[in-house]
Amino acid sequence: MSDDVEITGEDVYLARTEADEAALAVGFSLATGAEAVVGHDGFGVPVVDVVREGWTAAAQHARDVLGMDFLDWLSAVDEPGRDVPGVDVVLHVASSTSAGDIVTRRRRAGAAPGRVRRLLLRTAVPDADPVLGSLTAVWPGVAWHERETFEMFGVTFEGFADALGDGLRPLLLPEGFEGTPLRKSFVLAARVSKPWPGAKDPGESDARSARSPGRRKTLPPGVPDPSWGPREPGSGEAAGSAGEGSHGEP
């Protein structure tokens, strides 16, 4: 093998120019049968948005056509403020052939190591129908990631299968736990029992508010509104949860 450092695309990101982005978009659009949109994250890694129905086909295209054979992680981002509330499921994959020997050749020649080619694949899953095709047939190792996303965000992965054959089930939470802890609507027990923001003693937050009457109080994710929780007898009907109906306790 030659020790020259001429690299032909293996040590660069997939989309360095607008033409590269357009080619990526066309490839994923053809693979999924719907329009795909290509952008970048803050590090310059291509981000491909595909329709939910084409999720599995897009993953297969990334692996088989683009050589993204290494599964890094899969997770989700809660997006309750959109016109269609739901979560974005995000998959990060890379090419195992874009490092290793190429990096070794560049180091021997005194050149800077090449970059690993990687890609972010993203799709929107609505709250009204939180179902997405499983990628366990593409990358068996994604099973743990899908189980965690299932229990933390409430996304059901259709067609899920792992070596145990026990179906889609929680990964980290104890049996009987109710709610999805990484959704912004999930009420946290610590923020129910202690006034927000972070008062050390009962009434401390109220005292601060009295000193600053013009400051509008905000409720960060996990903080229940005043109607949340049980009521004293005779004070009216018990209010339901502001979010998932869970105190954050198993």
Image (cartoon, helix red, strand yellow):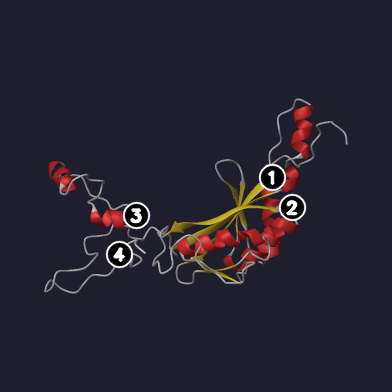
Q: Residue at x 34, y 61 (%)?
A: 248
Residue at image location 66% in from the left, 55% down from the top = 25
In-image side of 239 versus 185 (left or right): left
User: Is residue 2 found left or right of 131 in the rendered image?
Assistant: right
Q: Secondary structure at mark 3?
A: loop
Name the residue that disc number 1 marks: 117
CB contact under 8 Å: marks 1 and 2: yes
Quarter of the view holding residue 237: bottom left
Lower sequence index among marks 1 and 3: 1
Up-down: is 215 above or below 135?
above
Asked if marks 1 and 3 touch (Cβ < 8 Å), the reply is no
Q: Residue 215 appears at what percent x and percent y? A: 20, 45
Q: Would residue 94 be visible to someone looking at this image?
A: yes
Q: Nearer the viewer, residue 215 or 245?
A: 245
Q: Which mark is residue 221?
A: 3
Q: Quadrant of the N terminus?
A: top right
| Residue 178 x, y percent position in the rendering | 39, 67
Q: CA distance from mark 1 to mark 2?
A: 9 Å
The numbered dot on residue 67 is 2
* Picture disc at residue 232: none
235 to the left or right of 74? left
Q: Dot 4: few (<14), some (14–19), or many (≥20) neighbours within 10 Å?
A: some
Q: CA distance from mark 4 to mark 1?
A: 43 Å
